[in-house]
Amino acid sequence: MKCKYFAAVLISAFAVVSFSGCSFPRSFDETESGTAAGEGTAAAKEKAQENMQEEENEKVKIGVSFDSMEQERREIERTVLEDTVQKLGALVEIQSAEGDVETQKEQIREFTDESVNVIIVAAVDSSALETEIRNARNQGILVVSYERLVQGEQTDLFVAADSRMAGEQIADEIKNQLPEGGSILLVCGPENDRSSQNTADTLEEELEGNSWEIAYRGCAASWSGEDEKHAVEEAFQNAGKQADAIVCATDRMAGMAAEILESEQRTGEMAVIGQNADSDACRRIREGTQTMTIYIPAEELAEKAAEYAVQMAEGGNFSETITEEYELVGEEEEFMVPCYRAETLAVTEENVSKLGRNTF
């Protein structure tokens, strides 16, 4: 969706000279006076339009490139971003790359050519945007990594859910479901997705040294449905028969796992855990075919990304509200990126009824 702003003025002047049987035409002075008044009104209108256009041009402009709109919460995030930016008196253009890296690169290049003040990007592939992000920042454009931290080039802010908290919450549920220990399949997102890997790393750390074993850990090649399905199937092929639980990086993966268990007539034999708290996952939790999901506060993340983007563009200092730094390892140097982390929430059969349209 593109938000373009145009202003046009169409000014027409009509002079009508009326005659009657015994009347005389208006004098030259009268006609000249009327024309001058009309021209003055037209000039005033044109000046007003120019002032309005100048005010529009002076507004902060923000470009947003989402990875895709497949995730249920993306519609919520788009609406919140638009509303928040507009309430703050800025302009926003939101696009979706529909899962295609090259499309997202082109979108970032377009935003750069348009000289927006800030680009917010939810990366399709966090390792593939280094050149585009560098070019944007070299032109003075600020960049916000949204949900996935861009790799290889520094960005100005990272806004995401607390991935380590999510790992801790999943570990707690594993301990609750398997108090005597057990074997676990772990299906992560792409290897270059730091947030997904941090969740998995934290889970392993929380279970280490006890009677829970990670029997298999694999990664989806990308966030596409096809690659996620392949990753889940591979996990089952490698260690599915012996596993007591499967932990997935998304609820879509968890749904795939639930389908495999149903096809094998093993529903209920394994704990199935996903992330995102989408409506299908909540339905499966109520039905008993999924054990848990992680609620990601979409509205909070979108609102904060919008607020900080406008604040940064206006030269504001948000160091008082963002104190955490997130390490980004480049090929030759390390970057420290300020980070806003939103708290996650474990959703199980005990509290799933409280979950509305992606919001508690």
Image (cartoon, rainbow, N blue to C red):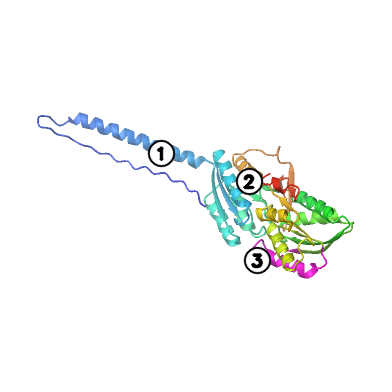
Residue range in magenta is 218-243
Distance between the Cα atoms at labels 1 and 2?
Answer: 33 Å
Pointer 2: residues within 10 angstroms few (<14), some, or many (20+)?
many
Q: Secondary structure at mark 3?
A: helix
The residue where tag 3 is placed is 226
Measure the C-alpha gap from mark 3 to mark 1.
51 Å
Q: Nearer the viewer, residue 247 or 24?
A: 247
Element assignment for label 1: helix
Q: Position of residue 118 (x, y in %)?
A: 59, 47
Q: Are marks 2 and 3 in contact (CB under 8 Å)?
A: no
Distance from the alpha carbon under mark 2 to that under mark 3: 27 Å
Q: Amino acid at mark 1?
A: Gln
Q: For residue 226, what is the image quadrant?
A: bottom right
What is the residue that sits farthest to the left in this orientation? 22
| Residue appearing at x 69%, y 63% in the figure | 228
Q: Amino acid at mark 2?
A: Ala
Disc 1 designates what residue? Answer: 49
Dot 3 crowding, Cα within 10 Å, few <14, some 14–19, many 20+: few
* Callout in the foreground (2, 3): 3
The amino acid beneath tag 3 is Glu
Decide: is 259 above or below 292. Answer: below
Question: Can you identify the residue that label 2 sits on?
Answer: 302
Name the front one of labels 3 and 1. 3
* Residue 291 percent location from the top left of the image: 76, 55
Asked whether disc 1 touches disc 2, contact meaning CB atoms under 8 Å apart, the reply is no
Check disc 1: other Cα within 10 Å, few if <14, some if 14-19, many if 20+. Answer: some
Residue 227: which quarter of the image?
Answer: bottom right
Q: Secondary structure at mark 2?
A: helix
Q: Nearer the viewer, residue 278 or 20?
A: 278
